[in-house]
Amino acid sequence: MKLLIIGSNGQLGSDLVKTAESLRRHIVVPIDYPQIDIRDKASVESVVNDAAPDAVINCAAFTAVDDCETKRDTAFALNADACGNLALAAKARSSLLIHISTDYVFDGTASSPYTENDNANPRTVYGKSKLRGEEIITELYGDNSMIFRIAWLYGAGGKNFVKTIRRVASSCSQENKPLKVVNDQFGTPTWTVSVCRQILSVIDGGERGIFHATCEGDCSWFDFAKEIVSAYGIGAEVSPCTTEEYPSKTPRPRYSVLENARLKALNANIMPEWREAFREFLSTEEGI
Ligand SMILES: NC(=O)c1ccc[n+]([C@@H]2O[C@H](COP(=O)([O-])OP(=O)(O)OC[C@H]3O[C@@H](n4cnc5c(N)ncnc54)[C@H](OP(=O)(O)O)[C@@H]3O)[C@@H](O)[C@H]2O)c1
């Protein structure tokens, strides 16, 4: 297939380009801002028409959760309205549209994993804008689009929890201070490459709609931080704390565990257990 990958310099997009190219089954056309501005209908139409792809895969978004609170218009322009531009441009060429969404569409008050059938109830501007993006794609092009909700993403590129913990734990170790990490927010660390492999394995299967696609199992941020510190051999003490002790500007979901229910029902779930994926990430050149 010919794949137009938008947001190709981002954390997920850059690994999707590499993973798709390594399969040698696809023609990959990577593009990112400013060569495309997904907020601009004409820009999207022109790029999609020039590339003439079988599938448009959108990895571009406004992902800075705290900044979304103060830049609401930008958040909705990029995470919601731009989805309309993508849906209409893909529809005009009958190209499949693949889009990425998030656990932040849920309120995080559940105590068992969220499935695709659970009601969304976002509590942040980021989550609300991403949910609106899902709705726009579904309204305009639901019959030929797939939306993958992912969570707790880390990879070789971009900012993420693994890199932050490595950096902060190293300075804590030098200063002989414990590293406090919240132990009452739960989710599933999910490696970019696992998501890429999952998307590419179902891309020509004919299924449409919303899919959860996170790694298997769950843990707290504290548990994940302990794994990271141990994997990189950093001599810092990691100590658990509560969300109240470590407040963030924007509320974080307490419980973000997603069940890949639709993929499992299709016998198509290839997402690995999160520790196994983290080990593979570490064994790659970029992971180390
Ligand atoms: N990161 C996570 O933990 C996480 C969790 C759940 C879901 N997700 C979702 O996963 C997807 C990928 O996230 P990510 O972490 O890979 O994001 P990212 O690293 O922030 O990448 C986003 C990309 O979008 C580009 N972009 C920004 N504005 C644009 C515009 N107007 N037109 C075209 N491209 C533009 C960015 O370019 P610039 O750098 O030049 O701005 C960047 O390359 C997003 O849909 C996100 O909501 C992420």
Image (cartoon, grey):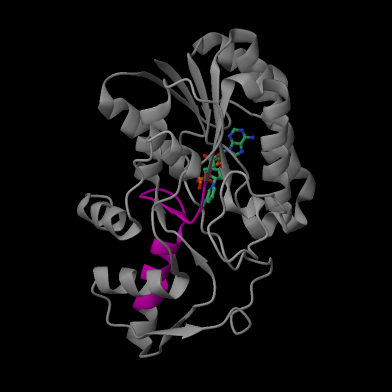
Seen in the picture, residue 176 relative to 216 is either above or below; the reply is below
Q: Front-most of 281 and 259?
A: 259
- Residue 160 colored in magenta in the image: yes
Q: How many marks?
A: 0
Tell me which residue sits at (34%, 28%) in the image: 20
Q: Is residue 104 magenta?
A: no
**On the image, which quarter does residue 130 sit in?**
top right
Residue at screen point 60% across, 16% down: 90
119 above or below 16? below
Q: Is residue 288 visible?
A: no
Q: Position of residue 74 (x, y in %)?
A: 74, 44
How far from the left and from the top, in percent, is residue 266?
A: 43, 33
In this rendering, position of residue 91 left or right of residue 132:
left
Q: Quadrant of the N terminus?
A: top left
Q: Residue furthest front?
A: 265
- For the C terminus, the quadrant is bottom left
Residue depicted at x 72% and y 31%: 136
Q: Position of residue 80 (x, y in %)?
A: 71, 37
* Front position in the image: 271 or 230: 271
Examine the image and state in which quarter residue 89 appears: top right
Ligand number 1: quarter of image: top right
Q: Is residue 134 left or right of residue 255?
A: right
- Which segment is the magenta one? 150-170
The residue drawn where x is 66% and y is 60% is 66
